[in-house]
Amino acid sequence: MKRAVEKLKFIDLQDLEDIAVGAALLGTGGGGDPHIGKLMAIQSIKNKGPVRLIDVEEIPDEALVVPVAMMGAPTVLVEKIPSGREIFNAFESLQSFLGKEVYAVLPIEAGGVNSMIPIMVAAEKGVPLVDVDGMGRAFPELQMVTYHLFGIPATPMVLADEKGNSILLKTVNNFWTESLARNATVVMGGSVMIAIYPMTGRQVKEAGIRDIVSYSAQIGKVIRRAHKNGDDPIEAIINATGGIPLFKGKISDVVRKTSGGFVRGEAYLDGIDEFKGEKLEINFQNENLIARRNGKIVATVPDLICVVDAHTGIPITTEGLRYGQRAFVLGLPCDEKWRSEKGIQTVGPRYFGYDVEYVPVEELNCL
Amino acid sequence: MKRAVEKLKFIDLQDLEDIAVGAALLGTGGGGDPHIGKLMAIQSIKNKGPVRLIDVEEIPDEALVVPVAMMGAPTVLVEKIPSGREIFNAFESLQSFLGKEVYAVLPIEAGGVNSMIPIMVAAEKGVPLVDVDGMGRAFPELQMVTYHLFGIPATPMVLADEKGNSILLKTVNNFWTESLARNATVVMGGSVMIAIYPMTGRQVKEAGIRDIVSYSAQIGKVIRRAHKNGDDPIEAIINATGGIPLFKGKISDVVRKTSGGFVRGEAYLDGIDEFKGEKLEINFQNENLIARRNGKIVATVPDLICVVDAHTGIPITTEGLRYGQRAFVLGLPCDEKWRSEKGIQTVGPRYFGYDVEYVPVEELNCL
């Protein structure tokens, strides 16, 4: 899937900016607005210094590692800014329940807010961040992680809200976790902070998607350098990711509905430049799920459908889609782990209710 | 409120039958069908022997006591029989979280299922049952206990379902507990088992309603004896409780709806015998809330509105109300703790959405 990744060892303020941008691209529209997450992480790095980023191989096999994240509709988070304490409440409650020190934290997914929160927690708690996640992108539901494919339970997990309420879940499977946690998130106001999928070093080495933080930083960096050097940022992204150009167009309509803890909807684009006269339709549920060009599918989950500003290359989240924006849409092949039978069952188009067979994006686009 | 109570020291199988009947009367229509709860408790007493019933004064001030109960719509429980394990899962998870042995268990309310479950847990866990509850009757929401009036938090609490899922809640107030737990109950299938309001001996001595188990047994016993001796059971109930006769009639209609984790509805009665030509309407939400005779209110929460079979005196739960039944309706004054300002705010008619001032049942009926 990925190009060669230059591994980061520490995350400073510049890296933070790069990661926020790069992870928002891999977030395929979801994972939350990077701006809010970044503000929180900047403060933590200013207070505590750069965060140490370690490779999965550096984790002792028996050590406890914990992904920390925001859960809920990103549209809600824009208006319901976290107090800043709830993620520590979630982290500490889970650590205390497990009765074992957390060796390191990690992102659950690549995405604006959810790439930033673990950096903030790592800084404040003085633990390293692991260069790994469970998606290699963003997905809307809790069982949609490669950890699930390897039979790792999501619970015990803790949800905490900005008012001070917290919930510790223990469930019989990861679908019950999703159902109970999603419902609680709605009651708690639409977004909460979570500590979930507590794992051993051994488990995350087997089931995680590696180098995702460094890869996010690298994507952000090529966009930043293109701006600085006056190069085309879209070309820079394509070079850095091997992304397949799917469309360039003007957003003509966005339909968006926040319900059941998700934001669902469609975006419609009218082609410009080399796509003039053509149409693109994107369906999303927090993340972009399916892209149809002139009625024909050109990419589906689990492959990545990334929408960026056609001029600046800056990723546009699903809650940031606006009428009139000029956007470039890229398709990126997902991690191989998702292309297994259980992977496609878990995050393929049929799971999301589309009667569509999964075909890899590179085949759909005849590469 | 109560007549003199003869205190029980142990609960054997005969007492269990009496408690189930008496508590169902005090349950004012709610608290669940006594039959299902009784089947579970009978087995436990057969296996483990009679349960020791202790007075609140016997609890050391610093000892930990825990109410255990069923939560949810009683109509659901009739069709979704507990596995039997979930209440122990709730009990053990809470004990383990608190890191302290539970000295004794207690009922949260008087009611069919919820008077039986703590007896079962006491038998199986080899701990005493305390002769106290937090209502002196049954109520539908978690903050509707005298413990709440004394500022005691409902959390940490644990909810457990028959599938093996469990939830540990820690909240900032008892309304959040109700909201989050109610929602989880719905997602978990409509009824769950809970361990809640962990308290010290000192707290329960101050805030509890005493002798409720013995009182329930006493009511059940007078009904049983009336049957045996061929006496009028209604008269026996009135003598034992000081209950005020509100109506005798035939149920002409019942409207019932299970939603949001509650069963809500109305029952309509046409008078017979001394009430011939008159009408009674009862509104309920799990429990009977308001009784109107010929359009005039004759009793409201927090006073007890008890519906019993006109012939046998056996209490009829709100899910047991059927067209054509001949019923006798009694009003019982509630415990004095409920008649405080905070008590009426918490469980008075206005809280349940009725624009009605609370007037004690004995005043409404000019005694």
Image (cartoon, coloured by chain):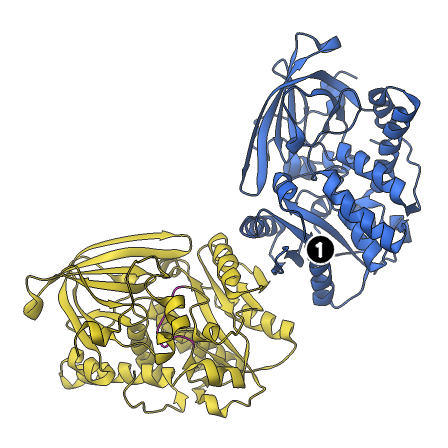
Chain colours: A yellow, B blue
Residue drawn 91% across the image and 32% down it: B4
Q: Is residue B259 above or below residue B355?
A: below
Can see residue B265? yes
Quadrant (top left, top right, bottom left, bottom right) of the C terminus of chain A: bottom left
Residue that mark 1 sits on: B87
Q: How many marks?
A: 1
Dominant secondary-structure state across the stretch colored magenta: loop
Q: Amino acid at mark 1?
A: Ile
| Residue that sits furthest to the top in the current view | B277
Q: Is residue A137 in the magenta section?
A: yes
Closer to us: B164 or B213: B164
Quadrant (top left, top right, bottom left, bottom right) of the N terminus of chain A: bottom left
User: Relative to B164, is A50 on the left or the right?
Assistant: left
Q: Could you tell me which secondary element the residue under label 1 belongs to? A: helix
x, y percentage for residue A305? 26, 69
User: Relative to B338, is A302 on the left or the right?
Assistant: left
Q: Is residue A221 in the magenta section?
A: no
| Mark 1 closeness class: few <14, some 14–19, many ≥20 residues within 10 Å | many
Can see residue A48? no
x, y percentage for residue B314? 78, 28
Name the quadrant containing residue A282: bottom left
Name the quadrant containing residue A18: bottom left
The chain letter for the residue carrying disc 1 is B
User: Relative to B259, is B100 on the left or the right?
Assistant: right
Closer to us: B12 or A117: B12
Q: Is residue B292 above or below residue A187?
A: above
User: From which residue to which does the magenta span run?
Assistant: A134-140
Closer to us: B245 or B347: B245
x, y percentage for residue B26? 76, 34
Residue drawn 31% across the image and 75% down it: A26
x, y percentage for residue A343? 39, 72
